[in-house]
Image (cartoon, rainbow, N blue to C red):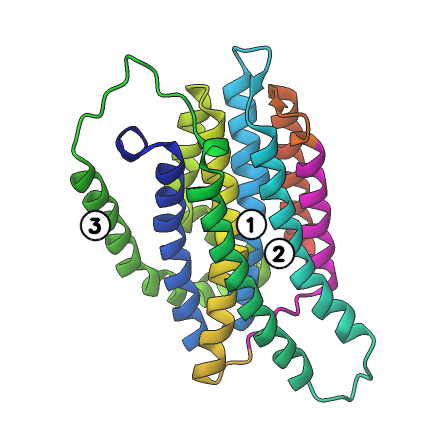
Amino acid sequence: EIALRSGSTVGALLNATFGNAVELILGIIALKEGLIRVVQASILGSILSNILLVLGFCFFLGGINRSEQKFNQTAAQTSCSLLALTTLSLLVPAAFSSTIPKDSPTHGILDLSHGTSVVLLVVYILYLLFQLKTHNHLYEDEIGEDEAPATTLSFSIGLLLVIAAIISLHAEYLVGAIEGVVEKWGINETFVGIILLPLVGNAAEHVSSVTFAMKDKMNLCIGIAVSSSLQIGLLVTPVLVLVGWTIGQPLSLFFENFETVILFTSVLIVNYLIQDGRSNWLEGALLLSAYAIIALAFYFHP
C-alpha cells in the first residue's frame, strides 16, 4: 500500500526501516543484558538472512513460472558495493586484531570501531541521498494500471508503526528467553543469534519481499531485502556500537574470523549472481543452499 501511494523506492525503504527498528530494539535490550555475542550474531544473521534467505526465496518463487526476471543492474550493483563496504568495516578490525600481540589492551579495537561507526553513519546518509533524490529512478518499479491503493498513506504508515510497536513490546521477553533456549536445547548462543533471532525479527520484510517477487516487482523486492541489509550494516550496527560505548558495554566491530569469512563469501556470491541484472529460480536455489550450509556450520560450530 505504501509503495502504491509513495513509490516503490520509499515503500521499500519504509518496509526495511520498520523491520530493522525491531532489530535495533532487540540489540539495545541485549546490550543492556550484557549479551554482546548475541548482539554481534544477530547483526551478522540479519545481513545473511536478507541477502541469502530472503533474496533466495525471491529469486526462487518469483522465477518458478518465468524463464527469468529483470531488475535494475546499476542499483543492485551499487547496493552490493555498499555491502562490500560493510564487510570491509568488519574485516579491518579482524585484521587489526590478528596483527597485534595477544596481551595488548583491546581499547585500540574499540576506538577503531567507534571511529568506523561514525564513518558508516555518514555513508548511510549519502546512500539515502543517492536512493531518494539524485538517483531515485534506478530503484523504481512500474506500478500496474490495475493496482490501486486500498487505504490512505497515513493509515498504512500508522499500521506499520502499531505492528512494529507490538513486536517491540515482546522483544524484551524474546531476549530474556535466549539463555533458557540455549540451556534447554543445548545449542550455542551464536546459532540462536545468527539463525533464529533474524527469522523472528525480520519476518515482516521477508514476507513483503517474496510477495513483490511473485508479482514480478524485482526492484522493489531487492530494494527491501538489500536495503534492509544495508540498514543493518550502515545504520543499526554503528548505532549499537555507539550505544554500547555510552552505556559501558564494549561492543566492537571485531567479529570472529569464521563469521567474517562467511559474510565476505556471502556478499561475493550475491555480487556474482546479480551482476547481470537478471535472476531465475536456479539462482534462488543456489542462495538458499548457501544459507542452509551456513546454518549447519553455525549449528555444529563450538
Q: Amino acid at mark 2?
A: Thr
Residue 249: image x %, image y %? 50, 81
Residue 61: image x %, image y %? 51, 22
Residue 199 appears in the figure:
yes
Residue in view at x 62 percent, y 81 percent: 111
Q: Is residue 7 above or below residue 49?
A: above
Residue 236 numbered mark, or none: none
Residue 170: image x %, image y %? 29, 58
Extreme-front residue of the structure: 134
Say which quarter of the image contains residue 68: top right
Closest to the observer: 194 or 69? Answer: 69
Sequence-first tag of 3 and 1: 1
Q: Is residue 67 left or right of residue 143?
A: right
Q: Amino acid at mark 3?
A: Val
Q: Main secondary structure of the magenta part?
A: helix
Q: Is residue 164 left or right of residue 277?
A: left
Quadrant containing the N terminus in the rendered view: top left
Q: Which residue is mark 1?
A: 47
Residue 196 appears in the figure:
no
Sequence-first tag of 3 and 2: 2
Circles 1, 2 touching at the beta carbon (< 8 Å): yes
Magenta segment range? 251-272
Residue 104: image x %, image y %? 76, 88
Say which quarter of the image contains residue 15: top left
